[in-house]
Amino acid sequence: MSRAVRFAPLALLLAIIAALVWRLATPTDTNVHSTLEGKPVPAFDLPAIIPGKPALSSAHLATGQPHLVNVFASWCVPCITEVKVLQALKQRGVHVDGIAVRDRTADLADFLARNGDPYERIGSDAQSQVQISLGSSGVPESFVVDGKGVIRYQQIGPIEASDIPTILSQLGRAR
Amino acid sequence: MIAETGLAALWLAAGLAGLQFVLMIASLRSGAEVRGAMRSIAIVQGALTLLAFAMLLLVFARSDMSVALVFENSNSAKPFIYKLAGTWGNHEGSMLMWVTILAVAGAFVAILAHRTSERTLTAALGAQAVLALGFYAFLLFASNPFARLWPAPEDGRGLNPLLQDPGLAFHPPTLYLGYVGLSVAFSFAVGALLTGEVDSRLARAMRPWVLGAWILLTLGITAGSYWAYYELGWGGYWFWDPVENASLMPWLAATALLHSINVLAARGALKAWTMMLAVIAFSMSMVGTFLVRSGILTSVHAFAIDPQRGTFLLALLAIYVGAAFTLFALRAPSLKEGAPFELVSRESGLVINNLILSVILGVVFVGTLYPLFVEALSGEKLSVGAPYFDAVAGPLALLLAVLVGAGPLIAWRRERRPVFKQLAIPALLGATALAITIILWPEMRILPRLGFLIAAYLAAASILPLVGRNPLRAPLATWGMVVAHFGIAVALVGMAANAAFTSERLVVDKPGEILSVGPWAVTLASVTPTAGKNYTAIEAELRAARGNDLITLSPETRYYSDPPTETNESAIRTFWNGQLYTVVGKQDVSGAWQLRLWWKPFVTLIWAGGALIAIGGALALLGRFWRPLRRRMISARERRSRRYA
C-alpha cells in the first residue's frame, strides 16, 4: 500500500474537520429568508370586514412609518396565542395591520372580542389572493414593511414572546 | 442525594478510565503484565456508570424538579412510561446513556473475551477506556445531567409531544446500543493495530460484537422508519433526513464490516481493509452523534442547538478518528496479507459487496454534509433532497441486491463450477415478474419495475444455499444469511409496491361526503373534540368500506399544552394486502376538514423485511454461541460418563 493511500483517510478527515470547525465558528442564521424581502409589497386593495375598522390596501403601507402586517384568520388556532404577543407589540408603539384570510365577519368579530384586537386596519382576503401574492404559504405569517412599502422581513409561523426583540429590531431597521 | 450519588459515580468512573489509559501505556511500552488489573477496572468502571444512569432514571421516575434536566424535559402530569423515556429524550440524558453503554460494553469485553491474545485485549480495553474518558469529560464539563436548580420549580416543562410515543421508549436505546456496540470493534481494531496482531483470532473475537451491533442498528432503523411513518403523518417511510442518514451511515459501514470480517476470520485476508472498516463504522456513529447533537444541520428531529457542545463533540471526533487513522497509516504496511484468492471466489464477491456498500456510504455521507459546505463557501442555503439520494443510491442498492443472490453460491479461494447455471431458475422468476408488470401495468416507472424483477429473483436465489443439502443440518449461520438475504427481497417488494401502487387523496371534506381511495370508499362520519391525559384533540370518525369490509378509523389532531405543540395522530388499519392510512388536518372557513387518505398496498413488507434481516443476524449470532456451547456440553457429558464408567 503506497504512502499516499495510507494517509488519504487522515487527510480527508482533517479536511472535513476543518470545514466543520469553520462552519461551527461562523454564526448561523436559522431563519429562512423570503425572496420577497427587499421588494415592494405587491399592489392590493382589500375591503373592510369589521364594521368601524378601516380597510387595508398597499397604499396604506407606504406612509413613512414601518408597519407589521399580520396574515391571520379567526379559524387559526396558533393565531389565538399570537394575538396576545401582537398586543404587547402594539403597546410598544408598533403599527399592526391585519390581513384576514378566508374569514367571516361574525367569526372574526367574535375572535377579536375574545382574544383582543391589536389591529389598526384589517383587510379581508376572502380568496387568499393577497396572501399568495405575498408569498405566504399559511397562517399566521407576518411581514415587516418599511415606510416606503418595501418588505424588510418575513416571519413564518406565529410571533412568540421570544421573537419580540427580533421583530422590534427589524422594525427599527425599517425606520 | 440521588443526583449527587450519580455525579460522584461518574467522576469515579472517569478516574478509573484514566487509570486504564495509564495501564495500557505501561503494558505497551514495557510489556508489563496488567491484564488482571485491566479487566477488573473495566468491570468496576462499567458498574459505576450503570449506577449513575440508574440514578438519573430514578430522579426522572420521581419527577424531582430540583434537577434542572427533569424540570426542562418532564412534567408530573406525564404518564409514567414517558417520565422514564424522558431520561434519554434529551441531550444530557442521551449522552449519559451513550457513555453507559460504552463502559458496560467495555466491562463485557473484559468478562467475555478469551479468544484474543492478552496483549491485544489489554490494548483494546485501554482504547475503550480512552473513548469513554472523552465522553465522561464531555458530560462532566459541558453537559452535566445532574445539575440542580435552586429554588426547585413547581412543575416541569414537559417533553416534546412527538416523542411521547411508545416508539421512543425503545427506538433511541436500540440505536444507541448499536452505535456504541461498534465502539468495541473500533477498540479491538486500535488494540490490534497497536500490537500488530491482526489475525483470524481477532476477527472471531470482534465478530459477535459487530453482528450484535448490526442487528440492533437494523432494528433501530426499521423501528425508526415505522415511527416516522405513523407519527409524522406524511405517509413516507424514509425521508433522507440528516438524522436518518446519521443512523444509516454506521449501518452501511457495519454491513460492509460484517462481510469483510468473515473473510478475515475464514481466510486471514483483507486485514488492512477490515481494520479500516472497523474504525470507519464507529467513526460514522460519532459523526452521526455530532450531526444530531450539535444542531449543525436542520432536521425534522429538532434537538437543542448549542455550538459549544458541538465544538466539544467535534474535538473528540477529531482526536479519536484522527488517532485511529494515523495509527492505521503507520501500521498498515506491517500487516501481512493472508491467503491469496482468485478473481472468481467468495473473497472477490465480498470485496465487490464492500466496494458497493462503501460507495453508497460515500453517496449518503456527501449528500448529508454537502449543504453544510455549500453554505460555508457561498452562504447559500440549500437542501439535498430525496431525488438525489433515490437517483444515486437506488440503482447501486439494486445492483448490490443482484449480487447478493450470487455471492453465497461461490466457493472460497477459487470457483471452478459455473455459478450462473444455479441462478437459472431465479433469473426465470425475475423475468416472469418483469413480464407480469409490463402486461398489467404498462405505465409503471422504471425503478419499481426493476424492484419487482430483482425481488423475485433474489427471493429465489437467497434460499439456494439451503437447496441440495439437509436444511436441518445446515449451520445456523447459513440459515441466518439466507433469512437476512430473503428479508432484502421482502423489503424490496414492499418498497416497489409502495412506489408503484399507492393511491393518495388530499381533500377538504364535509361530513357525509364519500371519497374513494384505492379500493376503499371513505365517509367522514363526524368530528368531535376529545381530551386525553395531557392534551386536547379533535377526533375524526371515518367509515371505510371495501366489498364486505366495513371499518371505522379515528385519526386525531392533538394539541399538547406543555410545551404547546400540535401533532397529527394518524389512524392506520393493516390488511394482508396493504394499509389504509388516514390523517385529519385543520378545519377551513366553510366548516370542511382537511383529510389525507392513502391506500398503500403491501407497504408493511418494508418493515417485515427489515425485521427478517435482523432475525437473520440474530440466527447467525446464535450460531456463533450455540456451536461452542454444544461442544462444551458434549465434552462435559463425556467427562461425566467417563467418571462414572
Image: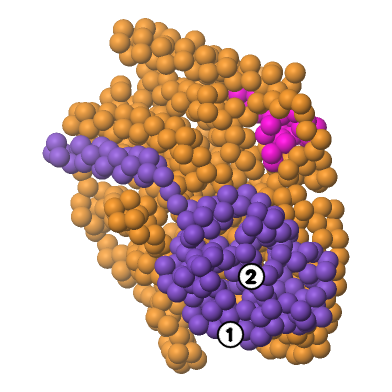
Chain colours: A purple, B orange
Label 1, label 2: how far apart the Cα atoms are: 13 Å
Q: In this view, does B443 lie above or below B18?
A: below
Task: Please provide the residue range marked out in magenta.
Answer: B48-73
Quadrant, the C terminus of chain B: top right
Residue B438 appears in the figure: yes
Mark 2 residue type: Asp
Quadrant, the N terminus of chain B: top right
Name the secondary structure under disc 2: strand
Name the secondary structure under disc 1: strand
- Name the subunit of mark 1: A
Q: In this view, does B483 lie above or below A76?
A: above
Q: From the viewer's perspective, is A147 left or right of B521? A: left
User: Residue B160 at what x, y percent from top left?
Assistant: 68, 50
Q: Quadrant of residue B43?
A: top right
Tell which of B399 and B515 is nearer to you: B515
Q: Name the residue under label 1.
A: A45
Mark 1 residue type: Asp
Residue drawn where x is 83% and y is 69% of the image? A113
The local crowd at label 1, few if under 14, some if 14 to 19, many if 20 or more residues have their Cα within 10 Å, is some
Q: From the viewer's perspective, is B165 left or right of A33? A: right
Q: From the viewer's perspective, is B618 left or right of B411? A: right
